[in-house]
Image (spheres, helix red, strand yellow):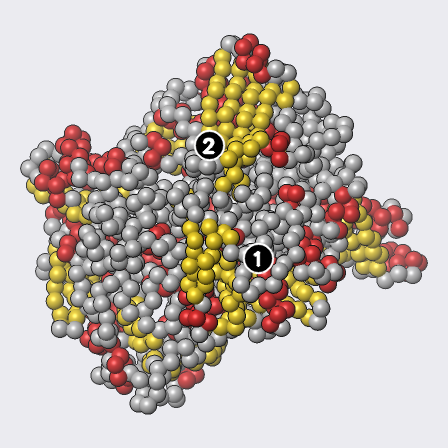
Amino acid sequence: MQPVPPVPPPMENMGKPDPRYEARSKVTGRARYAADEPVSNPAWAFLVTSAIAKGKVRRFLADEAKGIPGVLAIITHENAPKREKVAFFGDGGYVSTSLVPLQGPDIHHAGQIIGVVLADSYETAREAAHRLRVEYEVAEPVAGFRSPGAQTVELAAVKKSHKDVGVGDIDKGLADAAVTVDAEYFTPTQHHNPIELFSTTAVWNGDELTIYEPSQFVYSLKNCVARQLALPPEKVHVINPYVGGAFGSKGAPTQRTALVAALARQFNRPVKLVVARDQGFFITTYRAETRHRVRLGATPDGKLTAYGHEGWELTSMVDNYDVAGTENTAEMYASPNVWTKVNLVKADRNTPGFMRSPPEVPYMYALECAMDELAVALNMDPVELRRINDTMKSPINGAAYTSRSLMKCYDEAAAQFGWSRRDPRPGSMRDGEWLVGWGCATATYPTNMMPSAARVRLGGDGSARVQVAAHDVGTGAYTVIGQATAEFLGIPADKVVVELGDSRLPPGPVAGGSMTTASACSAVKVACDRIRERLGGSVPADPKALAGMFEKLKVGSLEEYAEWAPPGGEKGLAALHEGRMGGGSAERGGGTPKPAMFAFGAEFVEVRIHSRTKEIRVPRITGAFAGGRILNPRTARSQYLGGMIWGIGSALHEATEIDEKRARYVNANIAEYLIPVNADVPLVEIIMVPEVDTQVNPIGVKGIGELSNVGTAAAIANAVYHATGKRIRDLPIRPESLV
Amino acid sequence: MGGDTKATGVSRRGFLASSASTAAVPLAAGVLGAGAASAQAPGRAPDPRAPVDMVLKVNGTDYRLPLDIRTTLLDALREHAGLTGAKKGCDQGQCGACTVHLDGQPVLSCLTLAVMAQGKAVTSIEGLEGRDGTLHPVQQAFIDNDAFQCGYCTPGQIMSAAACVEQGRAGDEAAIREFMSGNLCRCAAYPNIVAAVKQAAVVKTGRA
Amino acid sequence: MRPFTYEQAPDARAAVQMAAVPSDAHVRSPVQFIGGGTTLLDLMKLDVMRPATLVDITPLEKAEAGRIQQTPQGVRIGALVRMSDAAEHPLLVQQFPMVAQSLALAASQQLRTMARLGGNVLQRTRCPYFREIAYGQCNKREPGSGCAALDGHNRLHAILGVSEACIASYPGDWAQALVALDTNVEVMGPRGPRVIPFAELHKPPADTPHIETTLVPGELITAFNVPASAAARRSLYLKVRDRESYAFALASAAVGLDLDGERVRDVRIGLGGVATVPWRARKAEEALRGQVLDEAAAEKAAEAEFAAARTHGHNDFKVPVGRQTLVRALMAAKAMEV
């Protein structure tokens, strides 16, 4: 199969490669992101954040700041109102951290919100925030894994719903093995850094509150703020039609929104907060650092006899956030003996959260590096090792995969990449001063779904409008929901108006877990099917015939509101209206084993490392992916493309550096927190392997937005080994890893 | 020292601009040569917090705005002129989302003081489209090549891309990649952006 | 950002007069000249720099300060020239490759378009403890407060020219070429013009890291005179960085060679990314002069230069990477066709 060009041709089991629905507004600057919303005479808020990670605010010296003309208020714990506490989303609540700011002098992490300045202008608010002097009582913080005093707890001991998955007897499996691998891996702290800054604009109209804020889950934000401010949820609206990148950072509501909304009420004026880039590192979430110990055992011909995986994940003192990626990695390869365990390590840090493929990125990195190490130990091609251990059923509970095209992906990508020309000996493929290495790894992502509602209206002129409070975070949701509506109604796509990103619309899924398309389009399908039924089975293409039918029905338009839940998730519909995650297939544990539902891919990379100075570059990367039905190959391709490049950054650049003594992020900006730039990415090839899956959901789609960034880091680490003979197990891999 | 009468003059008393629309306003040229110590008008205390009347020429239109002297060109556009196309992604000159053209040159509007942009032609994303709604070839190429996802960095990308094409730097892919490296895209549409720039360059030069 | 008064200077003399209000040599001097503003406004937003007066010197670009001119000795480069213009100037590209390359490899195209050369050499360090006022310890920002980088995160910090008071690295690229080529700096000051060697412009931190240059308060850089030489013609700038573009140097080397066959007649080396100031590698030069240039000689020279390196943990790798950057640059310069 050929790599797909930016404008893909029509392909098997794929929809039309239509350009993005909202393309024109994005290229003309008319797309209105949250902070673009014009509000009348706003007051500006600027956050004051803690310089220390642990201790107390002894006192504020505020005279200088207060004296600046234009300063309206300086709110600290000394004068802030008491706030309703809402539970951490991981505990069934909403917020990204249970730590409510301005409720007392205690400091729990660096960059904690300890004050808000409100002023007539942005410039004045920022100045006053900088001039508010703070005296602290400093205590010694726990920064991370290596800090003295870091406490480790077993996840199963602190989270009832978690059970460490496993099967068989790991010790026996290892004892039976001819070849074993036992290695430790590390992944660093990473921040999402969407280019859009975190912002909140709050406007009151009587007793109704409207919030303009970048959000991956407007219903959650609405319901959360309603509870925090003790308002009826129907009095709170969240409007955010365009999200400037999110990657998980705009999923669970942060504590800032209620603060801003309360100030707007108190001062009877719209309040606008645009959080400075550095502050964003501390007041929202991040991907916490992880450690892994992976043990693999195999027979001489490569059959796995044992897979053991213990993970350690960093979390805050106040919340237990976990990703527990072993739940997915345990499903990957046929092994009779699997043992897993997840631990949390508590530190004086802000609470971590979702970041693009939260469990899979760190855990698959460890597993896929270990698989490469095993292949080397077996003297076997790493692709063949995957083939030998490929499986069509879950090794844990025996449930069958609804579809699994892993090896097809490997074979297609390998052919395109030229893998057969690889000399497996490390350091053997030198090009002048540059060491060349080729590596590969598996990408995977589970197919998640959650309940969704949708409203579809068909007009007598054959045009349609579809409404759902889903979110297009750059994924193409506008486009595919529009295309799906058109397809289900049997009308042209350009006749469909799509409305998303507004809590006044029917509730939709969180833009997380790569489940928007599967969930929202399933609900859209129910609504469209009902409209077609009312028209006797189909929407006539002839406008006159359609007008005639509407006349007969005595309606100007046909409208259907529908709710859909994945099988077994019906009770999640109530949770959906409350903006809670739940009732979805993302929930695990208990009941009958659900089928194994995953999308797969295979990635091959070439790295070049300068023999003297050790810069590492990725001149080319090839990925093949199978994700069920693809509604729009153009937007899908972009997701795969962006994901693999994200993976390059994840392997070679991205790390939030922590001052171990002060427990503070030192590169909290995007000049020193490095993500790939255009020059880093000469060639990315994407192959889309057709896959038909009739079982996953009514429309046959799997989530793909978080598929292709899984596996990239392992493929690169494996290529670095091939280039140098050095096995680097800690990310990111940088010149200092290789000198 | 009379100063350049075409120059923009500023004093502590406030700001006096010279542009086509304000040519009749007396210049503060005399002040310019006088040195800071004597720059204040007699009897008036300097108040650096007093709003300064500025005139910004954006996309061919003069905007008269009373602004805090600290206002960046980006904030002037977004918060005062109502032109929210240029985006704030870092406010520190690190991401390129705020890229606009100043006298045809791509600059970071977040690191440009509005007061220093006076007397220069500012072009923002809103000024690229033809008055009849025809998209600039770079805008069309971005649509055709799916050169964006979330779209937030896109106005900045397009302004850089337009400069890249305009300056004749879209000759080969490596040159395009280097020129476009000052515009971060977290969705990582980079290869599609390169394809779009190539397409737009062909449109402009008529050569493949 | 604190409020400030803003004035535009029509020429250098006026600029200096406008700046002649109480001022000092401290990084946080209350009077600042502004050209491109790319460092200054960034640091003002962070409240690190708090000038009460900004003197806009961009009108100077209309005169000599905005030009690049060939001189009998070499080239005179005005301080208001944009980085992007100098990077592509044919005279610099052909006769002074390291000068042009060090500019082309710096920052991003937008920053190169905005930033002016005079300001470029005064670019401030990227040390996070300097740039973030949350940190109480920074001798550069608050003299006497200590240095958090010593026991903090110091991957990007300097290993040459460091002191107990400061290990902040000089972040620029172009200055390495200037220091290597014996550039002179033309300065206009309250007491008139003067010329200083570029090598004397920057002060290593010693125990006064808050005083970064030997410029007298109120002095303005107006031009750079780079002498032509055989070593300038056979020269290059090598920048080793985490990303392929738009990243600060982990290590860099501006290398110029005058060869007599394989033998080094003259050599000029400026090192970046590894030092507190633009670093003239005199020890390495000394080790090479008169020698046959091969890998062994290059390695030996690099070792001589980095023998004085002092590391602080995260930046340990800069010794081997810095050495190899120099070796690689020397060998590449030798292989150049001139």
Lower position in the chain sequence, tag 1 or tag 2: 1
Question: In the figure, C194 relative to A296: above or below?
Answer: below
Classed neighbour count for the residue bearing mark 2: other residues with Cα under 10 Å, few (<14), some (14–19), many (≥20): many
The percent position of residue A524, horizontal first and vertical second, equals 76, 48
Q: Which residue is mark 1?
A: A103
Judge by depth and name the residue closer to the eye, B20 or C53.
C53
The percent position of residue A354, horizontal first and vertical second, equals 58, 43
Where is residue A595, by image quadrant? top right
Label 1 sits on a secondary structure element that is loop
Q: Residue furthest bottom?
A: B43
Judge by depth and name the residue closer to the eye, A660 or B177.
A660
Q: Are marks 1 and 2 in contact (CB under 8 Å)?
A: no
Where is residue A131, by image quadrant? bottom left
Disc 1: host chain: A
Task: Tell me the CA gap for discs 1 and 2.
Answer: 36 Å
Q: Horizontal placement of A514 versus A363: left or right?
A: right
Quarter containing the N terminus of chain A? top right
Q: Amino acid at mark 1?
A: Gln
Residue at 17% from the left image edge and 66% from the top image edge: C216
Q: Is residue A356 visible?
A: yes
Question: Which-is-in-front pick, marks 1 and 2?
Answer: 1
Quarter containing the C terminus of chain A? top left
Question: In the figure, A208 relative to A633: above or below?
Answer: below
Classed neighbour count for the residue bearing mark 1: other residues with Cα under 10 Å, few (<14), some (14–19), many (≥20): some
Question: In the figure, A212 relative to A655: above or below?
Answer: below
Question: In the figure, A494 relative to B121: above or below?
Answer: above
Q: Amino acid at mark 2?
A: Phe
Do the residues at discs 1 and 2 belong to one chain? yes
Residue at 75% from the left image edge and 54% from the top image edge: A506
Q: Is residue B87 visible?
A: no
**Tag shown at residue A186:** 2
The percent position of residue A89, horizontal first and vertical second, equals 64, 46
